[in-house]
Image: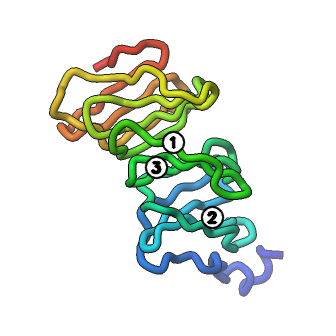
């Protein structure tokens, strides 16, 4: 039908209400590609959009602004939100589930499914590791430079490698099987 109907091929479909009242601070897509989750500012909130149905799935208001967010599964069912008040909020389909206070101000988070750890790039020379299976912090990774802070963190999708971007312009790598940095 779409090959023959010229009007059908040229139409544009938009997601309804795909906007934030003030601004957005973080946007991510779920692993299955069906949902887009957006963290907005003033008032702090998150919105989830369904790409297949082109609608907003839900909107939740928060106590602090979102610095980073990551989905812990294939869809929007489990999420971790890094907030600017030194907390990580965990959300489930029914709403907010739990909140954890972190040792220092965070800048980025990522989830490592092989070890079930939430990795937190924070101010200072440490990477904090929250083990979600045990519900406690593991021994943090640290690097030698004391005046350098991390700004970004990414877990490799195929290998057990973690890349950490820092203020000094260097990218440091960790192997999840070894506590020493590889740089």
Question: In the image, what residue occupies the spot 46% across and 29% down?
Answer: 129
Task: Say the numbered circle drawn on residue 48.
Answer: 2
User: Left or right: 5 with respect to 129?
Assistant: right
What colour scheme was applied to this rendering of the protein?
rainbow
- Element type where label 3 sits in the image: strand
Q: Residues within 10 Å of mark 2 (few under 14, many from 20)?
A: many
Question: In the image, what residue occupies the spot 17% across and 28% down?
Answer: 146
Q: Is residue 137 above or below residue 91?
A: above
Task: Say the numbered circle drawn on residue 82.
Answer: 3
Dot placed on the residue nearer the N-terminal end, 1 or 3: 3
Q: Quadrant of the N terminus?
A: bottom right
Instruction: Give the number of the mark in front: 1 or 3.
Output: 1
Q: Disc 2 and disc 3: Cα gap in Å?
A: 16 Å
Task: Say the numbered circle drawn on residue 100.
Answer: 1
Q: Residue 73's x, y, as percent?
A: 67, 42
Q: Residues within 10 Å of mark 3 (few under 14, many from 20)?
A: many
Q: Is residue 161 above or below residue 19?
A: above
Kindly indicate whether the residue at mark 3 contacts the one at mark 1 (C-beta within 8 angstroms).
Answer: no
Dot placed on the residue nearer the N-terminal end, 2 or 3: 2
User: Left or right: 174 with respect to 72?
Assistant: left
Instruction: Give the number of the mark in front: 2 or 1.
Output: 1
């Amino acid at each position: 039908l779409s090959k023959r109907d010229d009007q059908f091929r040229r139409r544009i479909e938009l997601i309804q209400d795909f906007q934030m009242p003030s601004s957005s601070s973080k946007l991510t897509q779920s692993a299955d590609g069906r949902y887009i989750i957006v963290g907005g500012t003033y008032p702090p909130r998150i919105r989830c959009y369904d790409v297949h149905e082109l609608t907003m799935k839900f909107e939740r208001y928060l106590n602090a602004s979102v610095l980073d967010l990551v989905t812990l599964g294939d869809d929007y069912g489990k999420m971790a939100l890094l907030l600017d008040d030194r907390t990580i909020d965990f959300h489930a389909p029914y709403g907010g589930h739990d909140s954890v206070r972190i040792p220092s101000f965070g800048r980025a988070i990522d989830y490592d499914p092989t070890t079930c750890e939430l990795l937190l790039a924070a101010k200072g020379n440490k990477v904090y590791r929250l083990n979600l299976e045990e519900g406690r912090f593991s021994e943090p990774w640290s690097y030698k430079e004391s005046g350098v802070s991390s700004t970004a963190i990414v877990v490799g999708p195929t290998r057990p490698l973690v890349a950490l971007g820092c203020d000094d312009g260097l990218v440091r790598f960790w192997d999840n099987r070894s506590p020493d940095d590889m740089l």
